[in-house]
């Protein structure tokens, strides 16, 4: 039988009748007005106390608020009470009967009541109640929150995997500022992609400008997914960051934290399953600050650890590469020296040629050894500078002359030009003469090497200029010297350009790729800067430019000169008056 | 008359090609040496050789790439790779050419000329 009863007397009667029919459990699920109806309407209250005295288990899920807190406390004496946010209407169900009220007023009997003892309806309502009961939280926590005026958040264990999946999706959807996500396995990433998590992450980053950080193990199948995420990143100011974990992860749960306000930790039960619902175990959802922030901290530790590991691995790779290339480069001239010295005896007629070749290769070996030693010094930060005051103009002039005679000796066809400044004293520096010479030589020999065999032109220009990028307001040393080396070769290869000044960047089969790395280190050790650009107009070629600060003494000297000139002009103009 | 033994040497370092060919010619081999793998490939198409001596690390076309092209022309050609690198190249070779039908040898640079000659005499 299912019916609707009208009138307070009728509804109370039917309720009390249902109480008396109850044998083991009475389950209530009602909005925040519910407790006042149960505890504020005398006959109902007595009926419930009677239930309790008969040993019947009463479970009561409701929304606990500031207004109903006293009714709730009273209710707690006879029933197990739990809290559920935003619950609507009211219903109660025993083993055999079901009642429900749509309208409830504070501390008043309900005006209408739906009643049913139809087995199917009762069972359906029992199931509904059980579902809501597992979703609710202990009342003590909610009461503390209300009374102490703090938001303690909630912590909830979710047993039902289907619900965990929904909570997972809702949690990601709710994020506005930040999503932190750690996955236990590569398969977890694939499972989550299947339920649309990847799309949700992209949507969060693109539409809500949410920062997304994902830490995940990888396998052959995950790369496509991750690239999809990272492609979105490029167009979106790096909102999505992915770090790949290569080590066997010790984390056996999916950890997601959003906006530092909510966390969901889901245990991994069976990684072989394709469906997320079959793969996961218990989950722990929390909005409690200490819990959520602990997971934020765990996330950050792992995040940084992965980066450190990457750096270490990269360093290791570079080190191996260095040894490999260095040994190859050393063996090549050694082979020539060994070969020629052996053949030397048998071919006296080629003596001159062979000695030249031996000496050329010995020099190459020496240069390489020096480069390797320099790199070692730079990397161990023991590149010491022996500074003195000298005129860079003289140094460049002498280097240029050396190269000219070398080009001539080798019957080269490259023209080497030096555009010196008008005044001789504009290029006084306080620097390590040998190191600066090395830097200039490196740039010049590169320029010559990459100039065309016919009509090659290399020009070096030096001038003094006011330092306009001086943001430290430091009056002294605001004059700098600019030296640029220009060639008319093919220009810097685009593949090399981004790592031009790093070790082993070379397109030449002969170079070690260490020269520009050393040059940059030398210039920077002198507080200078170095840059390169390709010439893009009608002419071809590349220009390398470095700066060095003008020596302090020279700077002061120039300032004094200027003041003198200034006062002389004054004198003259006074005289003219 | 003793049969002429012909060797094709390819190494991007002119000093190396010159040292190797001089050393081998002294022992009666006929040597064609190239620093450019493309030219070496053309030479192989027109000439006949008993052995290839190939450098591995070369710009434009490395020793393995050149060998792959030559193998298509003559699957039974013997080859001796010269390398200034460590063991890594053996693995790479095995991956690229799992079952070579001819004699393949690896020699590390630097090598003394008489050692090279001894090795070549073993193969040819």
Image: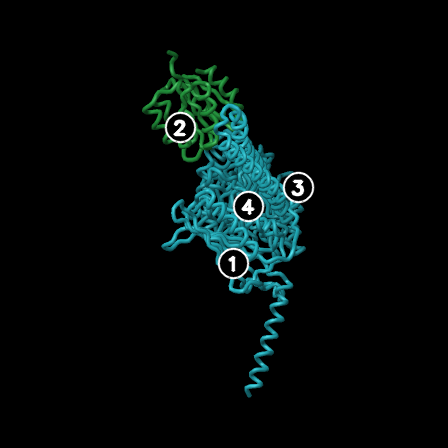
Q: The residue marked by circle 3 belongs to what chain?
A: A
Quarter of the picture holding the C terminus of chain A: bottom right
Residue A530 visible here: yes
Q: Which is nearer the eye, A117 or A344? A: A344
The residue carrying mark 1 is A462
Question: How far across and how far down the image is residue A360, in percent?
Answer: 52, 36
Please name whichever residue, A414 or A318, is drawn nearer the observer in this view of the structure.
A414
Q: Nearer the viewer, mark 4 or mark 1?
A: 1
Tell which chain the image draws in cyan: A
Give a yes or no on whether discs 4 and 2 share a subunit: no
Apparent side of residue A63 relative to residue A419 in the rendered image (left or right): right
Q: Is residue A566 above or below residue A323?
A: below
**Circles 3 and 1 on the same subunit:** yes
Q: The green chain is which one?
A: B
Name, please, the residue furthest toward the bottom. Answer: A577
Question: What residue did someone put label 3 on?
Answer: A53
Q: Give the image quarter of residue A267.
A: top right
Mark 1 crowd level (few <14, some 14–19, many ≥20, 10 Å Cα): many
Discs 4 and 1 carry the same chain letter: yes
Q: Residue A517 carries which label?
A: 4
Q: Are marks 2 and 1 on the same chain?
A: no
Quadrant of the image containing the N terminus of chain A: top left
| Contact flag, marks 3 and 1 (Cβ < 8 Å) | no
Give the spatial CA distance, label 4 vs label 2.
Answer: 32 Å
Q: Which chain carries label 2?
A: B
Label 3, residues with CA under 10 Å away: few <14, some 14-19, many ≥20: few
Read off the residue under disc 2: B66
Alpha carbon distance from label 2 to label 1? 47 Å
**What is the x, y in percent for residue A210?**
50, 51
Chain of the residue where label 4 is placed in the rendered structure: A
Judging from the image, the colouring scheme is: by chain
């Amino acid at each position: 039988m299912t019916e609707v009863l009208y009138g307070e007397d009728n509804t109370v009667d039917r309720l009390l009748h249902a109480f008396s029919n109850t044998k083991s459990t009475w389950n209530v699920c009602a909005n925040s007005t519910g407790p006042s109806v149960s505890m504020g309407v005398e006959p109902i209250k007595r009926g419930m106390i009677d239930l309790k005295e008969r040993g019947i288990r009463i479970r009561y899920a409701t929304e606990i608020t500031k207004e109903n807190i006293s009714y709730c406390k009273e209710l707690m004496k006879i029933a197990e009470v739990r809290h559920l946010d935003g619950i609507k209407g009211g219903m109660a169900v025993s083993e055999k009967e079901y009642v429900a009220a749509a309208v409830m007023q504070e501390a008043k009997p309900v005006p209408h009541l739906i009643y049913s003892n139809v087995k199917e309806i009762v069972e359906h309502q029992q199931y509904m109640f059980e579902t809501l009961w597992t979703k609710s939280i202990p009342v003590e926590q909610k009461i503390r929150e209300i009374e102490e005026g703090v938001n303690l958040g909630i912590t909830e264990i979710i047993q039902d995997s289907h619900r965990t999946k929904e909570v997972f999706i809702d949690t990601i959807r709710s994020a506005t500022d930040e999503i932190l996500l750690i996955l236990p396995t590569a398969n977890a990433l694939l499972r989550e992609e299947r339920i649309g998590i990847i799309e949700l992450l992209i949507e969060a980053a693109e539409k809500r400008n949410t920062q997304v950080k994902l830490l995940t193990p990888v396998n052959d199948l995950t790369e496509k997914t991750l690239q999809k995420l990272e492609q979105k990143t490029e167009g979106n100011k790096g909102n999505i960051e992915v770090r790949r974990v290569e080590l066997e992860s010790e984390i056996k749960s999916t950890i997601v934290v959003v906006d530092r306000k909510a966390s969901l930790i889901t245990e991994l039960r069976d990684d072989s399953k394709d469906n997320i619902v079959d793969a996961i175990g218990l989950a722990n959802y929390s909005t409690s600050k200490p819990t959520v922030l602990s997971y934020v901290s765990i996330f950050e530790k792992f995040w940084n650890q992965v980066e450190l590991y990457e750096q270490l691995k990269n360093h290791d790779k570079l080190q191996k590469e260095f040894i490999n290339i260095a040994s190859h480069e050393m063996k090549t001239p050694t082979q020539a020296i060994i070969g020629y010295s052996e053949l030397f005896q048998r071919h006296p007629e080629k003596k001159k040629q062979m000695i030249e070749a031996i000496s050329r290769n010995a020099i190459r070996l020496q240069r390489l050894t020096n480069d390797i030693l320099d790199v070692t010094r730079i990397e161990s930060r023991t590149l010491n500078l022996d500074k003195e005051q000298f005129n860079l103009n003289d140094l460049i002039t002498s280097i240029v002359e050396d190269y000219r005679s070398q080009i001539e000796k080798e019957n080269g066809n490259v023209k080497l030009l030096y555009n010196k400044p008008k005044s001789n004293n504009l290029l006084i520096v306080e620097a390590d003469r040998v190191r600066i010479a090395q830097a200039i030589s490196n740039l010049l020999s590169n320029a010559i090497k990459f100039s065309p065999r016919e009509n090659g032109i290399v020009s070096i220009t030096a001038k003094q200029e006011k330092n306009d990028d001086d943001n430290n307001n430091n009056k002294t040393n605001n004059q700098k010297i600019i030296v640029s080396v220009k060639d008319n070769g093919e220009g810097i290869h685009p593949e090399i350009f981004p790592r031009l000044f790093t070790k082993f960047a070379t397109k030449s089969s002969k170079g070690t790729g260490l020269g520009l790395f050393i040059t940059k280190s030398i210039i920077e050790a002198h507080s200078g800067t170095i840059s390169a650009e390709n010439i893009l107009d009608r002419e071809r070629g590349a220009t390398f430019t470095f700066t060095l600060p003008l020596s302090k003494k020279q700077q002061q000297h120039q300032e004094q000169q200027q003041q003198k000139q200034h006062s002389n002009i004054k004198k003259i103009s006074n005289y003219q008056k | 008359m003793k049969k002429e033994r012909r060797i094709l040497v390819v190494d991007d370092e002119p000093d190396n090609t010159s040292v190797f060919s001089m050393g081998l010619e002294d022992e009666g081999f006929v040597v064609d040496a190239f620093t450019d793998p493309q030219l070496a490939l053309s030479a192989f198409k027109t000439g006949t050789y008993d052995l290839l001596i190939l450098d591995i690390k070369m710009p434009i076309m490395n020793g393995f790439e050149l060998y792959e092209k030559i193998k298509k022309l003559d699957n039974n050609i013997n080859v001796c790779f010269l390398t200034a690198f460590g063991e890594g190249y053996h693995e790479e070779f095995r991956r690229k050419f799992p079952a070579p039908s001819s004699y393949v040898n690896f020699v590390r640079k630097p090598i003394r000329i008489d050692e090279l000659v001894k090795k070549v005499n073993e193969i040819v």
